[in-house]
Image: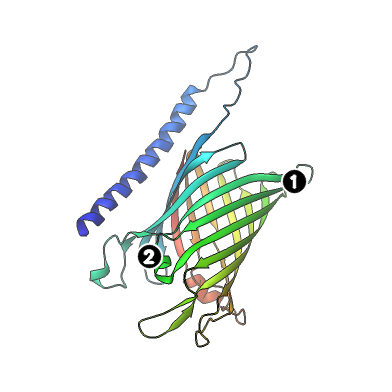
Amino acid sequence: MERIQRLLSNVWWGIIFTACLWGMRSHAVTTTAKTPPAQNSTATLPTSGIQATGYIDFRPSWISKTGGFTTEDTIELGAKLSADTSLTYMQGFNTNLYDPVSPASASGMRLEILSGAIKTKVNKIWENQASGLSLAYENRIYLPIDAGSGKKGTLTAIRNYLKLSKAISNTVKLTMSEVMIPIINRRSGNISSDGVATANNIFENRVYLITDIQLTEKLSLSLPIMFHQTRSGNFKGEAANNSAWSFYVWTSPELDYELTPNLTIGLAYYNNESFFTPNLSKTQFGSALESGEFQFALTASL
């Protein structure tokens, strides 16, 4: 098992390194290939048809509450079907770099495969250029290939994003997203080895408000606020969350710098605990901020 983990770690780091080199090389090729057009020449028409699209996002992370270091990484590959439509598959991975809390027996890379998703995006299903408004749609069908979903009996979660964007100026954009997520399970809940009953979630609604600011030509800042409302199913009367709603509020600001058109670096943060208790009866901003993770982000795209 240790040999397999070391092999996967070497492959993963190799992919990261190769993606970074590819991003820098593709920019260099694009730059050297640019030549001033002749005064009377005809502009080259853009290529049409299906195009490959994707990215790799690598995020070394520091967990402030435990002092541990991890990576939270995503790969996405697929096709751009038209100027505004794409179909891709995204897959997340987590790894351990340093864990001062868990016993030595639980150390090592601890590669964790997250739920993958088939993602369909339509960037502009409606647009009003005069008012700076546009409406986009995104659908994600999650595949429960991770151990946690299998243990809970989750079959799939289907996210439906409606994103209404408003250009405030040339440098500021506001986006309001409504996200409806039906969740399908094999069973309504689970009982742990110590007898604790927990109902499975059956529906989630999310509201995102995101402010995007273009600080300079290459430097951008994203300031989101996310509000989750989650409904659990009817499992057992003694289950603490049986047929109940719970709420979660969090943020994930990120500062990005575009090194090349295919390579971006950034600094990010997100809180692991909600700013409010699950029933919204009490604030807990201090503990929420202390629970956060600070990340260095490196994204290489096709």
From the top left corner, tell me how far across and down residue 251 is, in percent: 56, 64
- Visible in this render: residue 33? yes
C-alpha gap between disc 2 and disc 1: 44 Å
User: What type is the residue that disc 1 sits on?
Assistant: Gly
Is residue 53 toward the left or the right of residue 161 in the image? Answer: left
Residue 299 at least partly seen:
no
- Say which quarter of the image contains residue 59: bottom left
Among numbered discs 2 and 1, the one appearing first in the sequence = 1
Q: Residue at x 55, y 46 (%)?
A: 219
Q: Please give the name of the residue rendered at 20% of the width and 55% of the height, measured from the top-left corner.
A: 3
Query: Which circle, 2 or 1, is nearer the viewer?
Result: 2
Identify the element where label 1 is drawn: loop
Q: Position of residue 125 (x, y in %)?
A: 69, 45
Colouring? rainbow
**Tag 2 residue:** 147
> In the image as oriented, which residue stretches furthest toward the front?
186
| Residue that label 1 marks | 132
Name, please, the residue furthest toward the top: 40
The amino acid sitting under disc 2 is Ala
Residue occupying the point 74% across, 46% down: 132
User: Height in image: 226 above or below 76?
Assistant: below
| Residue 300 place in picture, x, y as percent | 44, 43
Q: Position of residue 81 (x, y in %)?
A: 57, 37
* Residue displayed at 64% across by 13% down: 39
Q: Secondary structure at mark 2?
A: helix
Residue, far left: 3
Q: Is residue 61 left or right of residue 107?
A: right
276 lies above or below 301: below
Quadrant position of residue 190:
bottom left
Question: Do labels 2 and 1 touch, CB within 8 Å?
Answer: no
